Amino acid sequence: MFIFNALSYCLKLPKIIWLDVFSIFVCMYSVLFYVIARNVVFYVVRNYLFYER
């Protein structure tokens, strides 16, 4: 039972660390995706308006 508790604790600790790292990565990628999507939208709108004239 003690080995099981130690094993579950050792598995729980990296899970918390991985969740923190994963949330940080998700935040970074969402910001990056937002910036890229905004640039793409501005680029498309600018080209569309430029070609419309």
Image (cartoon, grey):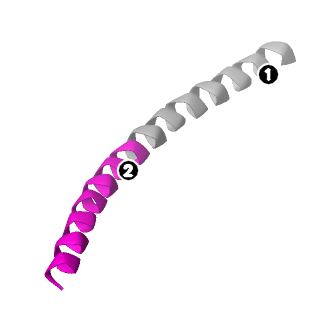
Asked where in the image residue 53 lies, by quadrant, the reply is top right
Q: Position of residue 48 (x, y in %)?
A: 79, 22
- Horizontal relation, residue 4 to residue 22: left or right: left
Quarter of the picture containing the N terminus is bottom left
Residue holding disc 1: 48
Q: Say above or below: 36 vs 10.
A: above
Please report the bounds of the magenta region as a residue range.
Answer: 1-26
Position of residue 27 in the picture relative to residue 50 (left or right): left
Q: Position of residue 30 (x, y in %)?
A: 47, 42
52 vs 42, left or right, is right
- Can residue 53 be seen in the rendering of this structure? no
- Mark 1, secondary structure of its residue: helix
Residue 31 in percent (x, y) is at 44, 38
Mark 2 or mark 1: which comes first in sequence?
2
Residue 41, compared with residue 49, is above or below; it is: below
* Numbered disc 2: secondary structure: helix
Q: Main secondary structure of the magenta part?
A: helix
- At horizontal 14% and vertical 81% (from top left) the residue drawn is 2
Query: Which residue occupies 23% across, 79% down?
Result: 4
Nearer the observer: mark 2 or 1; the answer is 2
Q: Is residue 6 magenta?
A: yes
- Alpha-carbon span between mark 2 and mark 1: 38 Å
Q: Which residue is mark 2?
A: 22
Q: Is residue 33 left or right of residue 2?
A: right
Residue name at image x 36 percent, y 52 percent: 23
Are the residues at dot 2 and dot 1 in contact (C-beta closer than 8 Å)? Answer: no
Crowding near pointer 1: few (<14 within 10 Å), some, many (20+)?
Answer: few
Residue 18 showing in the rendered view: yes
Q: Is residue 22 above or below residue 9?
A: above
Task: Please name whichever residue, 36 or 26, is drawn nearer the observer in this view of the structure.
Answer: 26
Q: Looking at the image, which residue sits at the far right? A: 52
